[in-house]
Image (cartoon, rainbow, N blue to C red):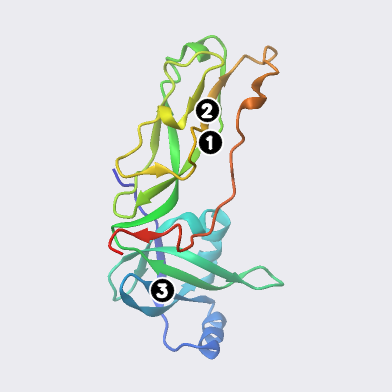
Amino acid sequence: MAGEIPDLVAHARTGTGKGAARASRRRGMVPGVVYGGGADPAAIEIPFNELLKKLKAGRFLATLWNLKVEGQEDVRVIARDVQRDTVKDLPTHVDLMRLRRTSKVNLYIPVEFTGEEQAPGIKKGGVLTTVRPEVELRVTAGDIPEKLVADVSHMEIGDTLTISDITLPEGTKPTIDRDFVIANIQPPSGLASQTDDEDEAPETEVINQTDETVTSEDD
């Protein structure tokens, strides 16, 4: 089941070039362009405060957005680049790319854990430790899962849950080509083993979308 795609509200922008971009910024907007998807590039502008809020929330470059421009049909886009002022580090321009429903894109999908109340290891005092609260998947733009469900009801103290233990939606696959750790159950405080160093640490780097990470099955 596809999750709800967040809206990115923008306005059509008249004029192009540096002069038009400066005028947009004076109005409290961030100029941008939307391209790809078999249509002509379109000049837009996004309210500065709204864009800054989304940037501070994180994952802006790894989120699929529903672009809403008054008088135009909504379109799914992903940010390819956000240019910033070199001194103030504030956004000055944004590039968005349209996606077809068949396009493949890398997105971070949250993991929901179930069965904690039934897990033998937790009943014995163990602690469920989440290594990856979200997983980067290669997904189809038209069928993005809302979440991944990880069942921990069978886990004992010392057990580890990996990506292979989770049933992935059809048409999706992890971007990491190995059986990485999602969570584990640690011993109660004071009894923790010193051999847990093998557990992986979560990767927090967001890789900017490139031509290699965004493709379309129609191409």
Q: Amino acid at mark 1?
A: Arg
Residue 165's disc is: none
Question: Which residue is more in the foreground, 70 or 35?
Answer: 35
Q: Is residue 194 toward the left or the right of residue 181 in the image? A: right
Q: Secondary structure at mark 3?
A: strand
- In percent of width and height, residue 85 lies at 65, 73
Q: Amino acid at mark 2?
A: Ala
- Residue positioned 70% across, 13% down in the render: 190
Q: Secondary structure at mark 1?
A: loop
Distance between the Cα atoms at labels 2 and 3?
Answer: 39 Å
**Quadrant where the N terminus is found in the figure:** top left
* View extreme (top): residue: 124
**Mark 3 or mark 2, which is nearer the start of the sequence?**
3
Question: Which residue is more in the foreground, 123 or 161?
Answer: 161
Q: Residue 57's quadrant in the figure?
A: bottom right
- In percent of width and height, residue 205 lies at 59, 49
Q: Residues within 10 Å of mark 3 (few under 14, many from 20)?
A: many
- In percent of width and height, residue 64 lies at 41, 57
Residue wearing tag 2: 183
- Residue positioned 59% across, 38% down in the render: 202
- Residue positioned 27% across, 70% down in the render: 73
**Quadrant where the C terminus is found in the figure:** bottom left
Distance between the Cα atoms at labels 1 and 2?
Answer: 7 Å
User: Number of marks in the image?
Assistant: 3
Residue wearing tag 3: 34
Q: Residues within 10 Å of mark 2 (few under 14, many from 20)?
A: many
Residue wearing tag 1: 132
**Mark 2 or mark 1, which is nearer the start of the sequence?**
1
